[in-house]
Amino acid sequence: MSFEIKYKDARGRVGTLKTPHGTIKTPALMPVIHPGKQTLQVADYGAEVVITNAYLIYKNEDLREIALNEGVHELIDFPGPIITDSGSFQLSVYGDVQVSNQEIIEFQEKIGTDIGTSLDIPTPPSVKRERAERELEITLQRAIESLEVRDELMLNSVVQGSTFPDLRSKCADALGEMDFQVHPIGAVVPLMESYRYKELVEVVMASVSHLPDSRPRHLMGAGHPMIFALAVAMGCDLFDSAAYILYAEADRLLMPNGTLKLENLYEMPCSCEVCTNYTPEQLRQMEKPERSKLLAIHNLRISFAEMRMIRQAIVEGSLWELVEQRCRAHPFLLEALRTLKNYSEDLEKYDPPYKKSAFFYTGPESLHRPEVYRHLKKMKQTPPKKSVLLLPRSGKPYSERLYDIPERFYRVIRQQESLDQLEDMQVTVVDVPFGVIPLELDQVYPLAQNESPDSYDEDSLKMVRNILSDYLEGFDQVIISEEVVEAFSLNKKYPLEEYHFPQPLNIVVNEQERIKMIADYQFGAGSGEGLFSGDVKIVKSRKTGKIRHVYDDEELIATLRASDGVFVLAREGARRLHRYLPYPKNRVVVNEDAEPFAREGKSIFAKFVINCDIDIHAKEEVLIVNEQDQLLAFGKSILNGREILDFNTGQAVKTRKGGF
Ligand code: GUN
Ligand code: ZN
C-alpha cells in the first residue's frame, strides 16, 4: 500500500492511495455498505472505495461463511478497495461486543479486506479524564496486539482520547511510531450529532498535528457533506458515509450546506438524476423502499460532487474560500471556523505560500487565515528603515498609482530627526487583510492577488490598528497620511501633529531595492543581498513594463514570475543562494544513489531525501544538495519540510535544472 500527495492547500491534500484492489483519489468518500442488506451499487455513483463492518459479517453465520469462502469483495459485490471496521462502533452503542480484538483481526485477514481495524474503544466526549486515560490505554494495547496478530493485513489504528486534546495528541504520537497504514480519528460521531463542531476542530487538530504526514487520516463516521471541506482543510483524507442511506430512510436530503426534509420541498434542490426526473410530490407518493433508494442516490451524488469540488479547490488553491462558504451554513460551523485561528502557526507550515487563486476576503474570519499570519511574521523579520510613510490603498498594484503627495495632510507621530531624510523612507500601504504592505512588495503573492471590500468592518479595523502599532515600533519617524488616520480611526490612538510636505514628493520604487526586498521576503532577510549583490541588470517586460529577469552580466540569476511576483531561480541564482544561505536552509539533501539523477535534472523522490530544511513550504524554490552540501540541482518543492522527511513515496521536489 502506498500514499502520495500531489497537491496541497491549507492542511488539505489531494493524493492517491494504492491498495491491493486498486488506486483511489483522496480525499475520498467511502460509502458504508451494510453486508447482506445493500441494494445500491455505489460504484455507479462514484464510489472508488467502500467501508463495511467485519463484526456484522462475523456475527451472522451465512455472511461469515460466504466471506470466509469467497472473500469480502465477493460478499458485498464490490471489486475495489474495501476497508472494514471492527465492531467498535457497536461497542460504543451497545456497550458490549461478542468478539475479541485478536479474533476480529484474524477474521478481517481471512476475508481479504484491504485495510482492517482493531477493536478500539470509542470513548465519548466530555467523560472524566480517568476514564479517557484508562480506555486509551486499552485502545493502544489493542493496536499493538493487532500488529502482532496480523500476517500481511494492512491496518487502521484509531486515535481516541475523548475531548482531551493532549490525550488525542499522545495517542497520535504513540500510534505514529508503529507500523500502521491509515489513522482514523474516532469517537467524533457524538460531537457531530450534537453540532459540537468547535470541539471537533480541537480534537482533529490535536490528532492530525501529531500523526505522521505520510499516512492518510480517516474522520470516522463523518458522512455529512457540510463538514467535508472543513475536515479536509484540517488534514483529513478519508470519510465514510452511512449518512447517505440513513438520511434517505428518514426522508432527508443531504446538501453541502445542510439537510432538507422531503416534506418541506416545493422544488428539488439539485441537478442529479433524481432531482431532475422527479418532483417532491412524486417522491412523497412513492412506496418507502423505492423513495429511500432514490433519495440515497441523490445523497451519494451530492456527497461525491462535494468531494470533487474540494479536490478541485485544493488544486487551484481556493480551499479556504470553500471552507469559509461552507462554514456559514450553521452558526456552530462558523464557530468552528473561528476556532481555527488558534492553530495559525501549525496551519501556516502546511499551507502553500503561492497559489493559483487570489485570496478572497469573505469576512472577518479571513483575517486569521495562514496567509495573513505568514505575512505578518515575515514583516517582523525584515529590517526597517529609519522612517516610514503610511499611505492608503488606491487600487492595485499600489506602486503604479500616483500618490498625490503635496495636496494631502500628513501627521507625524514620532520624530527624532529632521524630516528632510525622506529619501530613505519606507513607503507602506495600509490595507485589509494584510495590514502593512511595503510598496516594493506590492506585486508579490498574495499582497497583490487579493480582493476585499472597499469598506472596512470593525474586526478589520481593530486588526489593522494592532498590526500598525507593532509595525511602527521599528521606526524612528512615522508619517501617516490623513486618509489612513481616518480610515482606521487612528486619531485617538496617536496624538498627531499636523504636517505638510515642504515640496512635492515623487514616490518611485527603486527597482534595485524592489528585487532585494522581494528576495528577502521570499527567502529570508539578507537573501536579497546574497542573490543580487554586485552589478545586476534588470530586464523588464516590453509589454507590461514589469520586472522579468535579473542578470549578472550575461548570466540569468532569476526570473520574476508574472503570476505571483516571486522569483524563480536560474542556475546562477541557485549558486548564489546556496553560497549565501547557511546549511540546511532551503535545502533538500539527497543520498548518493539519487545524486546522478538530481544532476541530470530528474525530479526528487521523497525516499531519496536524507535531510532537509524543516521550514520549507510546499511550492517554494529549493536547493538540492548532497551530504557534503554540494549543489546538485534546484527546483520547486511539492511537499513541506516535514512531509518530505516523513514520506517514502512520491515526489518531493520537481527539479528545474541540474547540471552543476
Ligand atoms: N465508527 C465511528 N466511530 C468509530 C470509532 O471511534 N472507532 C471505530 N472503530 N469505528 C467508528
Ligand atoms: Zn439531487
Image (cartoon, rainbow, N blue to C red):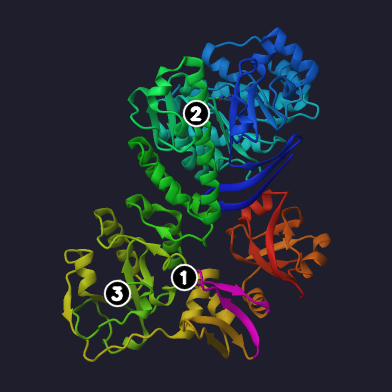
Residue position marked by numbered label 3 in the rendering? 390
Q: Toward which corner of the image does residue 567 lie, by quadrant?
A: bottom right
Q: What amino acid type should be assigned to the residue bearing mark 1?
A: Val
Q: CA distance from mark 2 to mark 3?
A: 48 Å
Return the x and y of residue 46 as percentages of the image width and height. 60, 36
Q: Amino acid at mark 3?
A: Leu
Q: Which residue is mark 2?
A: 188
Q: Is residue 556 magenta?
A: yes
Callout 2 touching callout 3 (CB < 8 Å):
no
- Ligand 1 within 8 A of label 2's CB? yes
Which residues, given as a range, are shown in magenta?
A: 554-571
For mark 2, give the secondary structure. loop
Vertical position of residue 459 compared to residue 335: above or below: below
Q: Which mark is residue 444?
A: 1
Q: Position of residue 412 (x, y in %)?
A: 22, 77
Local packing at callout 2 (Cα closer than 10 Å; few below 14, some 14-19, many 20+) is: many
Residue 450, above or below 510: above
Q: CA distance from mark 2 to mark 1?
A: 40 Å
Q: Is residue 268 visible?
A: yes
User: How many callouts does the rendering have?
Assistant: 3
State the residue at coordinates (36%, 50%). 365
Residue 584 in view of the camera? no
